């Protein structure tokens, strides 16, 4: 039988799924969530079995990489067992996770044993008071211990993610690069995206472009373009004399990555999002629940959903919310 692959209307092969396993989180980062969030009731979210069934269907359709995200994936009970089941799906090449790191001290070892391949860990500040302010609840030392636990457990190519906001943490950019170099980690700097209504700050005023981040880094380090590329939205550089770390820039405000976009997202409500910046979506939970024991129905719906994938997203910076979802619904 010919290998099955997912392709959209613009001939892009879709082989990367980002799955949100919870909308809940132990942090309330100022760019991601409101202070008092209402989370989804249990009946509306996919069970662990349903998450596994979704992953199975995508892998059967040629998905090679899955990233588990949230919310904070490590606050979902049963996450280690879910990782083990997804990692064992034949044909899946990589199972990754994006985490805030708070639970990694406890879970890095079990996750590694379960077959998780790689971790992205968010880190926006190295100052404990500021870290608490930006995450509203987070403990910097616990997160750093989590990062070190991941390395001790054998994870390699761990990447730090830093959302840069003018006047909030832009003065720490070079220190964060040094932190990554000291630990042999990669680091990506992300422009804040207009996802969800927040009142804590003005996204337009806090905007700090990737170009400005690069200039900041160049004040202390010599950046050389990395020759190895990934198909993701990050463009990578290296610091001269520090071959162990790559520096990435994720710039959603430019269209640099839409042409090669290979990914779709599944919310924990079972809604398949074809593009981070658009509302095009398909309700896969209904398909799954209406057709128990008929995996081909779910696979057919996924194939049909590919026709909804738009050519590109279009974020503006005028502070109007263009996508009402918060980032914890889509998982970034
Ligand atoms: N809780 C995990 C974490 O923080 O890494 C995973 C989920 S979080 C939504 C995924 C990534 O999205 C994090 O790196 C976070 O910094 C980023 N993020 C959240 N809201 C964002 C926004 N409005 N703009 C840009 N990045 C955002
Ligand atoms: Fe939680 Fe991650 Fe959102 Fe921060 S960015 S509130 S850690 S889901």
Image (cartoon, rainbow, N blue to C red):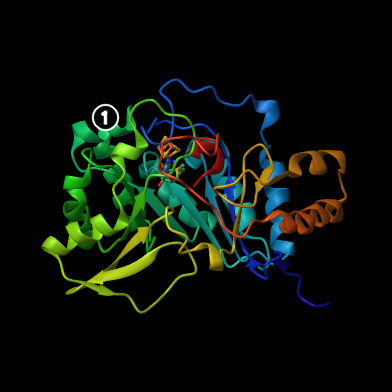
Quarter of the image for residue 241 reads bottom left
Q: How many marks?
A: 1
Q: Hey, which residue is sitting farthest left in the picture?
A: 220
- Tell me residue 61's x, y (percent): 73, 64
- The residue at 32%/75% (across/down) is 226
Q: Is residue 42 left or right of residue 68?
A: right
Q: Is residue 218 left or right of residue 318?
A: left
Quarter of the image for residue 166 reads top left
Q: Nearer the viewer, residue 302 or 281?
A: 281
Q: Secondary structure at mark 1?
A: helix
- The residue at 42%/29% (across/down) is 198
- The residue at 75%/44% (across/down) is 284
Q: Is residue 297 above or below residue 257?
A: above
- Tell me residue 304's x, y (percent): 79, 56
- The residue at 25%/35% (across/down) is 131
Q: Nearer the viewer, residue 17 or 21?
A: 17
Q: Is residue 265 left or right of residue 161?
A: right
Q: Nearer the viewer, residue 202 or 127?
A: 202
Q: Report ligand 1 position as a quadrant.
A: top left
- Tell me residue 295's x, y (percent): 83, 53
Quarter of the image for residue 101 reads top left
Q: Hey, which residue is sitting farthest front in the picture?
A: 318
| Quadrant (top left/top right/bottom left/bottom right) for the N terminus | bottom right
**Residue behind label 1 places its C-beta within 8 angstroms of ligand 2:** no
Q: Is residue 145 above or below residue 117?
A: above
- Tell me residue 156's x, y (percent): 37, 64
- Dot 1: within a 10 Å radius of its alpha carbon, few (fewer than 14), some, or many (20 or more) residues? some
Q: Which residue is mark 1?
A: 133
Q: Is residue 55 above or below residue 198?
A: below
């Amino acid at each position: 039988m010919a290998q099955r692959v997912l392709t959209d209307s613009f001939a892009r092969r879709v082989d990367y799924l980002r799955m949100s396993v919870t909308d809940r989180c132990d942090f309330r980062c100022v760019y991601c969530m409101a202070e008092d969030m209402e989370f989804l009731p249990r009946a509306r979210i996919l069970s662990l079995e349903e998450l596994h069934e979704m992953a199975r269907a995508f892998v059967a359709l040629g998905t090679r990489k899955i990233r588990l995200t949230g919310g904070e994936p490590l606050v979902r009970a049963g996450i280690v067992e879910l990782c083990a089941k997804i990692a064992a799906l034949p044909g899946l090449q990589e199972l990754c996770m994006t985490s805030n790191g708070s639970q990694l001290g406890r879970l890095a070892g079990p996750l590694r044993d379960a077959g998780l391949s790689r971790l992205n860990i968010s880190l926006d500040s190295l100052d404990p008071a500021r870290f608490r302010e930006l995450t509203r609840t987070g403990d910097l030392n616990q997160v750093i211990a989590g990062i070190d636990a991941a390395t001790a457990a054998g994870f390699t190519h761990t990447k730090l993610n830093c959302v840069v906001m003018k006047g909030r943490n832009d003065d720490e950019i070079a220190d964060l690069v040094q932190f990554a170099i000291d630990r042999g980690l990669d680091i990506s700097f992300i422009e804040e995206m207009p996802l969800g209504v927040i009142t804590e700050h003005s996204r337009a005023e806090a905007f700090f472009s990737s170009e400005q981040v690069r200039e900041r880094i160049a004040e202390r380090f010599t950046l050389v373009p990395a020759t190895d590329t990934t198909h993701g939205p990050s463009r990578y550089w290296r610091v001269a004399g520090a071959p162990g770390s790559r520096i990435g820039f994720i710039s959603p405000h430019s269209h640099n990555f839409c042409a090669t976009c290979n990914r779709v997202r599944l919310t924990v409500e079972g809604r398949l999002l074809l593009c981070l910046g658009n509302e095009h979506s398909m309700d896969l939970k209904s398909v799954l629940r209406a057709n128990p024991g008929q995996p081909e129905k779910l696979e057919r719906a996924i194939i049909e959903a590919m026709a909804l994938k738009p050519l590109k997203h279009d974020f503006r910076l005028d502070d109007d919310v263009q996508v009402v979802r918060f980032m914890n619904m889509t998982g970034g």
